[in-house]
């Protein structure tokens, strides 16, 4: 997790992130069955340690390359500005993303997955 303007991210890295090309290696994980195309995005163990018992339910399904929360928070990095960006993530953004993904876990079906894939493609090519 990085905040907006993180100096560790190179120009090429920013381009890869903006175009989502940095996600392509995860297709291998899909092919070998470790991930799915749609499902809650994997989170750093550092943040998973902060989950409530209810939030841990997002770990009951295979993580995905895209999710409803990643579609809604497609500009998340730009929201994480200032010196307290990580606390803002923990207190505000992460709980909302988890609520979105929990709704997905409890109500997902093939039509829902198709809708999320379509939204993701629209974002990628817009």
Image: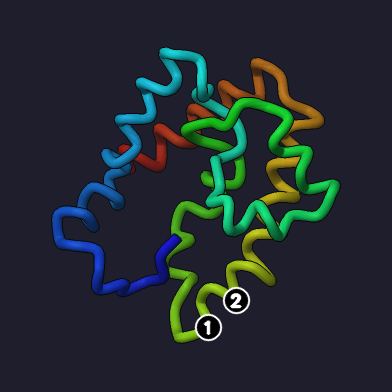
Query: Which residue is located at x 71 percent, y 60 percent?
Result: 50
Percent coordinates x, y for residue 121 in the rendering: 40, 32
Which residue occupies the foreground of this view, 72 or 35? 35
Query: Which residue is located at x 74 percent, y 32 percent?
Result: 105
Cα separation, mark 1 vs mark 2, equals: 5 Å
Q: Secondary structure at mark 2?
A: helix
The residue pinned by badge 2 equals 87
Which residue occupies the foreground of this view, 96 or 48? 48
The colour mode here is rainbow
Which residue occupies the foreground of this view, 107 or 40? 40
As displayed, is residue 57 above or below residue 27?
A: below
Query: Which residue is located at x 17 percent, y 62 percent?
Result: 10
- Spot the residue most to the left: 12
Left or right of 115: which side holds 100? right
Q: Quadrant of the N terminus?
A: bottom left
Q: Residues within 10 Å of mark 1 (few under 14, many from 20)?
A: few
Percent coordinates x, y for residue 95 in the rendering: 71, 59
The residue pinned by badge 1 equals 84
Left or right of 77: which side holds 112? right
Query: Which residue is located at x 60 percent, y 75 percent?
Result: 88
Which residue occupies the foreground of this view, 38 or 30? 30
- Spot the residue most to the right: 54
Q: Quadrant of the C terminus?
A: top left
Q: Residues within 10 Å of mark 2 (few under 14, many from 20)?
A: few
Percent coordinates x, y for residue 16 in the rendering: 23, 47
Discs 1, 2 touching: Cβ within 8 Å:
yes
- Spot the residue most to the bottom: 83
């Amino acid at each position: 997790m990085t905040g907006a303007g993180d100096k560790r991210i190179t120009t090429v890295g920013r381009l890869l992130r903006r175009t989502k090309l940095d996600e392509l290696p995860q297709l291998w994980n899909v092919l070998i069955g470790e991930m799915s195309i749609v499902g809650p995005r994997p989170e750093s163990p550092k943040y998973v340690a902060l989950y409530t018992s209810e939030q841990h339910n997002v770990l009951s399904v295979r993580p995905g390359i895209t999710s409803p929360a990643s579609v809604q928070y497609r500009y998340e990095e730009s929201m994480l500005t200032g010196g307290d960006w990580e606390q803002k993530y923990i207190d505000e953004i992460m709980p909302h993303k988890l609520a979105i993904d929990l709704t997905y876990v409890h109500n997902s079906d093939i039509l829902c997955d198709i809708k999320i894939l379509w939204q993701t493609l629209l974002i990628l090519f817009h």
